[in-house]
Amino acid sequence: MGTLYLVRHGQASFGADDYDQLSELGMRQSVLLGEHFAHHALKFDAILTGSLKRHVQTLQGILQGMKEEHAAAQPAPLVWPGLNEYDSAAVVAAIHPAPLAKPDTPEMYRQHFRLLRDGLAQWMSGTVSPRGMPSYSDWRDGIVRALDHVRQNVDGNVLIVSSGGPISTAVGHVLGTSAETTIELNLRIRNTAVTEFAYTPKRHMLVSYNALPHLGGREHADWISYA
């Protein structure tokens, strides 16, 4: 039986011109997770990552934290675009075509996530087709194919670095959750959180979700973030 570790990227740049870029905190979160993995002498037999900058940068931070002796023993990552996040701006625009100002107040952030929740539900049901995005079923298939690749081709420890949408969708797929539950899982996942599956050649099984083993100390309480 193998173990699959799914890691959400570190804090990105929500509200900036380029969200797809780790913040300084996001890199520190990633490095500390790598230190945690090294402390437990974790050796990965395969690494998969989405192709977004925040995925690649998070993996770089993890390997930096694992230090040379541990990082050098890790395999080269397989870039898997099917692990990329949905376009949240396109999802929101599908149900709210009028331009929205960048959120910079608590109420504007709440409005953004209300619209995102509604837009995700309508995309998942096939009610709307966000511009430039595949159907939900096609997007979901890219994530399921990554899970299938792991259980069919690897026997051991696997690291996936991705985003909240793909990771919550993977959990929803394994547990058979409703669309509403999958959305709630998505909107609760924290930066650099670790979700763990056990797997065999036939199936995946959820062990833990949204854990922060590297940020459990009081000194890291203000390192916990959601964007």
Image: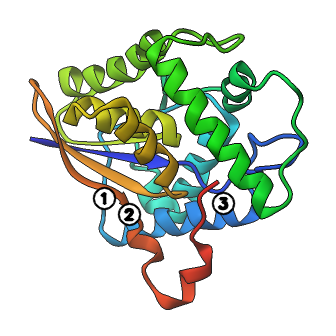
> Disc 3 vs disc 2: which is toward the camera?
3
Residue located beneath label 3 in the image? 26
Residue 163 place in picture, x, y as percent? 53, 40
Answer with mark 1 or mark 2, whichever residue precedes in sequence: 2
Q: Which mark is residue 119?
A: none
Quadrant in the picture for the N terminus: top left
Q: CA distance from mark 3 to mark 2?
A: 17 Å
**Residue 28 place in picture, x, y as percent:** 64, 67
Q: Amino acid at mark 1?
A: Leu
Mark 1, Cα crowd under 10 Å, few <14 / some 14-19 / many 20+, is some
Mark 2 — residue?
37
User: In percent of the image, x 49 and y 11: which residue is there?
Assistant: 126
Query: Pointer 1: what residue?
Result: 42
Q: CA distance from mark 1 to mark 3?
A: 21 Å
Q: Which is more N-terminal, label 3 or label 1?
A: 3
What amino acid is at disc 3?
Answer: Gly
**Amino acid under label 2?**
Phe
Q: Quadrant of the C terminus?
A: bottom right
